[in-house]
Amino acid sequence: MQIRILVVDDEKETGDYLQLLLTKAGYEVVALTDPTQVMDRLRAEDFHLVILDMMMPQMSGTELLEKIRGYDSDIAVIVATAHPAVETAVASLKAQASDYVKKPVEPEELLAAVESALAKKGLSKDPEAELHRAIGRTIREARKSQELTLKQLARRTGLSVSLLSQIERAESSASISSLYKIASALRLRMAELFGGA
């Protein structure tokens, strides 16, 4: 699934910069300079996150945030402002903003805020890759805790050392049959491979 972000900033250069930064990070980004167009875009297209400038001439970020919340109570919203103030921070939090960042934004800080806001909604750029990494990590930890080598696990499962190594490093997606063999060999329940208790 492609994560889509809507950037709203009346300064075109800032919007372009954020669009470039977030696109390079793997997100699909639309930048708007006119806050009055935001609600139409949200109704017409699916977005997972809005990055919202607080100070805009046509409409304040607080007003727009309240309109967004009136339409969609679940979408993640990060408020960005060059003039942080207690009032705007409180208003943003009351309208359930996911985060509040100071402009000019530091790239690392913004990307961390975006990832955190999306994670709170159960979203990530590549949930499938995260699942493969979690399965691989569980298998590797279980194998090492039982002091088994890849070769020994291969003998127990009938799978190749190469395939087992790829599964542990999340370079290969294992079939259910392979996962069942690995779970049985490590005396794990299938649910444990997927992070279940």
Image (cartoon, rainbow, N blue to C red):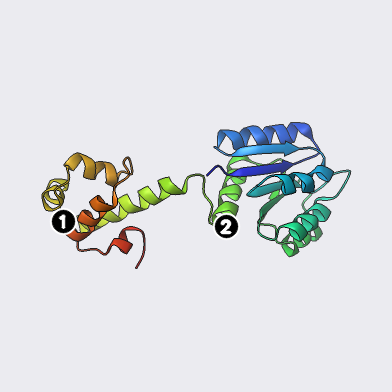
Does residue 136 appear to the left or right of 87 in the view shown? Answer: left
Count of marks, rendered view: 2
Does residue 76 appear to the left or right of 54 in the view shown? Answer: left
Task: Name which residue type carries label 1.
Answer: Glu
Instruction: Using the rendered view, name the quadrant where residue 36 is placed.
Output: top right
Task: Name which residue type carries label 2.
Answer: Lys
For the point 58% across and 42% down, the residue is 108
If the image is split into quadrants, where does the C terminus sit?
A: bottom left
Element class at badge 2 = loop
Which mark is in front, 1 or 2? Answer: 2
Q: Nearer the viewer, residue 149 or 195?
A: 195
Residue 6 locus on image (x, y percent)? 69, 43
Does residue 22 appear to the left or right of 137 in the view shown? Answer: right
Residue of label 2: 121
Residue 147's tag is: 1
Q: Residues within 10 Å of mark 2 (few under 14, many from 20)?
A: some
Q: Is residue 15 visible?
A: yes
